[in-house]
């Protein structure tokens, strides 16, 4: 077991949905949380990252910083998704190596797997086929981060581990009307339809794709668990192990929000991968399991959205 007591822990991306959840989960630990604002440190700048890491000397680094977005954003800005994520993770991982960081945790994404991967998706299916075209640039960047961590472990005997989370939602999400992921986009869309008395809400795609949605606080618990209990390769999947169709998920969000109108699906828009559910047996066998139900998590998220996040999103 790796003890976090007394450690200096740098959470890169601490202001985002995932990073802030990790900060909340680490708060009860007897450790020092080291942060830096985005305006003060551009993680794409190798020289600045090296300088900051040498000055602040964290014992543990968690890479929750990334450029993220839904299908529309991935399709529209593929160069940025590739460049920004490659630079962020490469700079932080290499600087962690140079400064002899004791442990590093890199967060990937379930989109790294082949479009037609067998289901549920096991870790060993990585690089087993063609990627989903709508998020290929983002996936390639994340795959590079996974391989980079493994390579530093092999060549330099580092303890750099990786987790592969499923689709996430929760407090602090991005509710941009075009660039958001499915849960945040639908929460905003149904909320605005409710307050505007709109008769119908349009949802991208056919509604048939199957997804695994996990509350970000469950991922944060998995991160802390893995830091303490995991020091091996390969990476570990993190999800709920359950799946729901986009159509059923949209109906659930509509019910949570209290929207009474109709739901229609825009089949001119892409579906993405038709089925994507994670096999989480490896991390479950180590002793971790999710504990926030989907409806419970959406209700909590919507309450927070209505109280303050929505104001920011405007």
Image (cartoon, grey):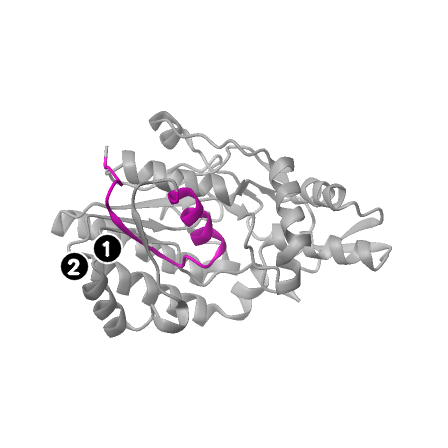
Residue at the disc numbered 2: 99
> Picture coordinates of residue 117 (x, y %)?
46, 42
Highlighted range, magenta: 2-27
Which residue lies most toward the left here?
A: 156
At 51% from the left and 31% from the top, the residue drawn is: 291
In this rendering, the label closer to the viewer, 2 or 1: 1
Q: Is residue 234 left or right of residue 100?
A: right
Residue 186, can we see it? no
Query: Is residue 66 found left or right of 50 in the rendered image?
Result: right
Residue in view at x 30 percent, y 73 percent: 45
SS category of the residue bearing label 2: loop
The N terminus, quarter of image: top left
Q: Nearer the viewer, residue 145 or 132?
A: 145
Cα separation between marks 2 and 1: 8 Å
Of label 2 and label 1, which has the lower sequence position? 1
| Residue that appears at 34% across and 40% down | 29
Q: Please tell me in which quadrant of the rendered image residue 14 appears.
A: bottom left
Indicate whether residue 23 is drawn in magenta: yes
Q: Residue 11, how many percent across, how many down? A: 35, 54
Rendered position, 81 above or below 6: below
Q: Does residue 235 sit above or below 264 in this rendering?
A: above
Asked whether the beta carbons under mark 2 and mark 1 sit within 8 Å of each other, the answer is yes
Which residue is more in the foreground, 199 or 18?
Answer: 18
Classed neighbour count for the residue bearing mark 2: other residues with Cα under 10 Å, few (<14), some (14–19), many (≥20): some
Disc 1 target residue = 58
Q: Is residue 208 visible?
A: yes
């Amino acid at each position: 077991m790796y003890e976090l007591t007394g450690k200096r822990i740098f959470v890169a991306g601490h202001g985002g949905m995932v990073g802030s959840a990790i900060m909340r989960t680490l708060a009860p630990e007897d450790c020092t949380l080291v942060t830096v604002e985005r305006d003060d440190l551009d993680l794409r700048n190798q020289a600045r990252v090296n300088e900051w890491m040498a000055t602040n000397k964290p014992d543990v680094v968690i890479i929750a910083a990334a450029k993220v977005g839904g299908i529309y954003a991935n399709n529209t800005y593929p160069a940025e998704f590739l460049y920004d994520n490659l630079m962020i993770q490469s700079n932080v991982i290499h600087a962690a190596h140079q400064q002899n960081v004791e442990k590093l945790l890199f967060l990937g994404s379930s989109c790294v797997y082949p479009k037609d991967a067998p289901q549920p998706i096991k870790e060993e299916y990585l690089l087993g086929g063609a990627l989903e075209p709508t998020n290929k640039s983002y996936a390639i960047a994340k795959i590079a981060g996974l391989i980079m961590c493994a390579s530093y472990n092999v060549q330099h005997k580092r303890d750099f581990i990786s987790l592969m989370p499923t689709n996430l939602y929760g407090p602090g999400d991005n509710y941009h009307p075009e660039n958001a992921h499915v849960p945040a986009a639908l929460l905003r869309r149904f909320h605005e339809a409710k307050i505007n008395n709109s008769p119908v809400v349009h949802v991208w795609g056919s509604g048939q794709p199957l997804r695994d949605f996990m509350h970000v606080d469950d991922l944060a618990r998995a991160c802390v668990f893995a830091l303490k209990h995991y020091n091996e390769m390969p990476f570990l999947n993190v999800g709920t192990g359950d799946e729901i169709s986009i159509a059923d998920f949209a109906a659930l969000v509509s019910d949570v929000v209290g929207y009474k109108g109709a739901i229609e699906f825009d089949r001119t828009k892409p579906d993405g991968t038709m089925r994507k559910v994670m096999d989480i047996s490896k991390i479950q066998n180590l002793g971790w399991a999710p504990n926030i139900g989907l409806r419970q998590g959406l209700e909590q998220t919507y309450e927070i959205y209505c109280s303050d996040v929505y104001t920011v999103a405007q």
